[in-house]
């Protein structure tokens, strides 16, 4: 074996890692904790990030790390623990604030804790005084997402935080603002009427709404206590003085680095546009509506939109003026576009047949033979069944507010099955009654079919636009990476059009190869607790659940 082969063999040995972590997704890799400073969608696993960083630091002399999709700040924190300089950015203002808190180096911990304790005591005593003047917060739909008493309590907390920060000196103001506003944001999430475990905005069921009762001030006190404990533990782990810079910026333009260069890009980008994967903007919306004025005044973080989803990769307000040919340097990408076009053409044909069957059914006044014929068309049967189920669900939800959402869905499913069976019943009276009810629903079914016909080609454009944006990020990270530097991308293979599995890692590898990178390794790990849905309703077919990303793929490449 020659020296070059020996070195390559040694390098490959470092990737013999067990990355299938199980258990709790801790705050950080260096201590276990049931606490968390703030929930966030699709958070990276600290232990995995730590293992990757440690390997790369030891075997490739890494000292400077960039994460252009900083998210909740996991890469930022693990870089700091390992004594690495870190630069990061995100287009979500809440993510920027959360990441800044994670790498917060607290000077004079005793003073910080003492002042916050005074504020918390003040909150409790003032809460008893109902005559304490403060402005009640108002924004669109606030009463839909929060109970009246909680609006009052949160407005009270916000006012006291603002008054407290106004009195702080410049030296400590930023530290106080980050700590207090992250605890406040976490409190907002807890006392809102949103479903637990969701990152899209869904209101809790009427039955849960009646039972919902929580004291926002007490929640805030607990959040503050937990946050201070976690920050104190984290600060004890920092052995070296390092740089940690986090900016509100677009990953397609790393202007904040100026003439700086980095050794390593370690990132986990969105796996698709927010509409069809993770809605980061929706998740952050309520917190930003409550806090945007305080964030700008006390932290200099300007909230440009209450919902940043439209500005993220592939979003409606993203910039797509870009040469298509460059993303086609990936054969995998070319194959994906070809497959999407093939499936779309097939579906267009099927949808046309479905529409023709529906028209026949309507034109012949739902005569029995045409109902039978229509329900033999599987696509039309699914659409009619879904329309019936939706109408029944809404009717029960509006009339039986004491029932849980799960129970309402069960009843609606049963009643829908009965409705379809009645349509096929040989007894004329039973069938006639159901047919009359069906007549009112068919125009909506027709609208759905026409909408599906228009949406198929549009979905292809949305997928391609996402990859145009992602390629811009690849070009930009290449620009700021030193020769011999490394890029490590953690991605999932998402599903588009309900059935095409997109090989994100291979598309990235194709692009990097075209840019003169060499693949170092490609690793896989099973999801165990990353906060993402295991199944979603297909936006393409609307009739089935599809599996979302159940594996992560870690691609590591080196710039030649």
Image (spheres, grey):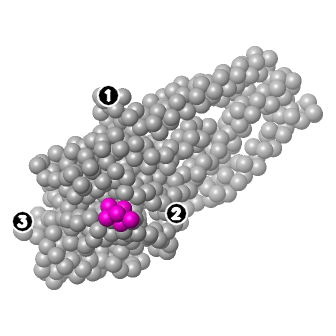
Q: Which residue in the rendered view is the most extreme toward the top?
A: 363
Does residue 120 appear to the left or right of 307 in the view shown?
left
Q: In this orientation, does residue 437 appear?
A: no
**Circles 1 and 2: CB atoms closer than 8 Å:** no
| Upstream in sequence: badge 2 or badge 3 | 3
Per the image, label 1 sits on a secondary structure element best described as: loop
Residue that label 1 marks: 323
| Upstream in sequence: badge 1 or badge 3 | 3
| Cα–Cα gap, marks 1 and 2 | 36 Å
Residue at coordinates 14% horizontally, 73% vertically from top-left? 241
Does residue 279 appear to the left or right of 238 in the view shown?
right
Residue 404 in which image quadrant? bottom right
Residue that label 3 marks: 170
Check residue 526 in the rendering and tell me which mark sits there, or answer none.
2
Residue at coordinates 19% horizontally, 56% vertically from top-left? 262
Q: Nearer the viewer, residue 108 or 547?
A: 547
Q: Is residue 489 above or below residue 211?
A: above
Residue 536 falls within the magenta-colored stretch: no
Residue at coordinates 48% horizontally, 28% vertically from top-left? 458
Q: Report the span colored magenta.
A: 1-6
Q: In this orientation, does residue 370 appear?
A: yes
Quarter placement of the N terminus: bottom left
Per the image, label 2 sits on a secondary structure element best described as: strand
């Amino acid at each position: 074996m020659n020296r070059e082969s020996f070195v390559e063999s040694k390098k490959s040995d470092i990737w013999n890692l067990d990355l299938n972590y199980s258990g709790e997704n801790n705050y950080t890799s260096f201590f276990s904790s049931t606490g968390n400073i703030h929930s966030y969608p699709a958070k990276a696993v600290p232990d995995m990030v730590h293992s990757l960083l440690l390997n790369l630091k030891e075997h490739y002399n890494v000292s400077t790390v960039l994460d252009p999709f900083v998210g909740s700040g996991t890469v930022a924190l693990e870089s700091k623990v390992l004594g690495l300089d870190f630069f990061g950015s995100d287009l979500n203002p809440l993510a920027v604030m959360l990441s800044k808190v994670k790498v917060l180096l607290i000077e004079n911990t005793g003073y910080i804790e003492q002042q916050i304790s005074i504020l918390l005591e003040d909150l409790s005593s003032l809460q008893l005084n109902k005559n304490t003047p403060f402005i009640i917060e108002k924004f669109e739909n606030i009463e839909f997402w929060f109970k009246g008493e909680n609006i009052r309590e949160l407005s009270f907390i916000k006012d006291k935080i603002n008054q407290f920060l106004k009195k702080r000196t410049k030296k400590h103001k930023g530290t106080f603002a980050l700590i207090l506003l992250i605890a406040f944001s976490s409190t907002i999430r807890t006392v809102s009427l949103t479903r637990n475990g969701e990152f899209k905005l869904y209101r809790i069921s009427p039955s849960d709404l009646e039972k919902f009762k929580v004291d926002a001030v007490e929640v805030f006190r607990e959040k503050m206590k937990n946050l201070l404990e976690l920050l104190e533990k984290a600060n004890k782990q920092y052995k070296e003085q390092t740089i940690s810079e986090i900016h509100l910026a677009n990953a397609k333009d790393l202007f904040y680095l100026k003439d700086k260069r980095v050794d390593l890009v370690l990132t986990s980008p969105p796996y698709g546009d927010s509409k069809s994967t993770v809605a980061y903007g929706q998740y952050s919306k309520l917190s930003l509506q409550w806090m945007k004025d305080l964030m700008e005044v006390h932290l200099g973080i300007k909230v440009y939109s209450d919902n940043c989803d439209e500005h993220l990769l592939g979003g409606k307000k993203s910039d797509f003026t870009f040469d298509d040919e460059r993303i086609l340097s990936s054969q995998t990408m070319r194959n994906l576009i070809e497959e999407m076009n093939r499936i779309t053409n097939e579906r267009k044909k099927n949808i046309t047949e479905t529409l023709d069957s529906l028209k026949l059914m309507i034109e012949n006044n739902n005569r029995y033979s045409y109902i039978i014929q229509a329900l033999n068309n599987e696509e039309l049967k699914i659409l009619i069944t879904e329309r019936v189920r939706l109408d029944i669900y809404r009717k029960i939800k509006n009339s039986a507010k004491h029932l849980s959402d799960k129970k309402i869905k069960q009843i609606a499913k049963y009643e829908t099955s009965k409705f379809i069976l009645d349509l096929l019943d040989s007894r004329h009276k039973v069938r006639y009654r159901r047919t009359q009810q069906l007549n009112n629903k068919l125009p909506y079914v027709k609208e759905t079919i026409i909408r599906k016909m228009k949406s198929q080609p549009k979905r292809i454009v949305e997928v391609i636009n996402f990859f145009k944006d992602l390629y811009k990020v690849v070009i930009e990270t290449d620009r700021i990476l030193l020769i011999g530097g490394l890029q490590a991308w953690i991605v999932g293979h998402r599903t588009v059009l309900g059935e095409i599995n997109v090989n994100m890692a291979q598309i990235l590898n194709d692009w990097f190869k075209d840019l003169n990178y060499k693949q170092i390794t490609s690793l896989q790990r099973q999801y165990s607790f990353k906060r993402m849905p295991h199944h979603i309703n297909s936006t393409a077919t609307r009739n089935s659940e599809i599996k979302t990303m159940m594996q992560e793929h870690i691609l590591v490449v080196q710039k030649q």
